[in-house]
């Protein structure tokens, strides 16, 4: 049986507790409240090999755009490289975006998140991180266009629509 997050994006692994924590962390990030990092760190303490949880954690450091976050981003990337053998295509896309950002290829990271959204338009993590990356890069039209392109794949009945 295939696993997905609340939004229907595929997961390669993760027990029910870890997936629930990811879903809560995604919702916290979308609302810009509470602490999505604490939520995902709690899950990863119990399930450190949860690939999408690790991608989410690394992405939080990526979009923070703080120099102090760089050591944590690199630590996460090192772990993700080790976990890549168990990752699905979606997660490989996240790893490519994180690698590009860590290499200071910010436009490459934005493009990698964009490619993810072509294959998985319901990947709310890729959409959120792409959106924040576009903002940081000053890509004003992409702030509108990315959302407009995936919007037909969503309905008002979806959580967090």
Image (cartoon, helix red, strand yellow):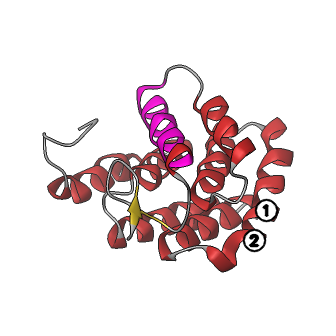
Would you name the residue on which mark 2 appears?
81
Location of residue 83 (image quadrant)? bottom right
Residue 94 left/right relative to 72: left
Q: Is residue 57 left or right of residue 148?
A: right
- Write the residue at 46% across / 50% down: 125
Q: Residue 116, image x and y in percent?
A: 43, 68
Q: How many marks?
A: 2
Magenta-colored span: 18-32
By secondary structure, the bulk of the magenta-drawn segment is best described as: helix
For this orientation, the residue located farthest to the bottom is 85
Secondary structure category for the residue under label 1: helix
> Going by the picture, which residue comes out furthest to the top?
34
Circles 1 and 2, Cβ within 8 Å, touching? The answer is yes
Residue closer to the observer: 145 or 153: 153
Membership of 20 in magenta stretch: yes
Instruction: Indicate the quadrant where residue 74 lies.
Output: bottom right
Q: Where is residue 75 in the image (x, y as percent from the top left)?
A: 84, 54
Q: Position of residue 157 (x, y in %)?
A: 13, 40
Q: Where is residue 17 in the image (x, y as percent from the top left)?
A: 54, 43
Crowd rating for badge 1 (residues with CA inside 10 Å; few <14, some 14–19, many 20+): some
Residue placed under numbered mark 1 in the picture:
79
């Amino acid at each position: 049986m295939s696993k997905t997050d609340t939004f229907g994006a595929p997961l390669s692994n993760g027990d029910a507790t870890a997936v629930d924590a990811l879903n809560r962390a995604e919702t916290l990030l979308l609302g810009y409240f509470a602490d999505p990092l604490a939520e995902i760190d709690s899950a990863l303490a119990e399930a450190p090999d949860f690939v999408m949880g690790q991608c989410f954690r690394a992405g939080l450091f990526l979009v923070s755009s703080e120099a102090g976050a760089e050591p944590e981003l690199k630590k996460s990337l090192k772990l993700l490289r080790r976990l890549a053998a168990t990752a699905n295509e979606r997660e490989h896309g996240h790893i490519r975006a994180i690698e590009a950002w860590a290499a200071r290829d910010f436009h490459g990271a934005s493009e990698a998140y964009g490619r993810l959204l072509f294959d998985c338009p319901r990947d709310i993590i890729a959409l959120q991180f792409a959106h924040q990356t576009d903002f940081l890069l000053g890509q004003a039209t992409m702030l509108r266009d990315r959302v407009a392109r995936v919007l037909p794949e969503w309905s008002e009945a979806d959580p967090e629509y």
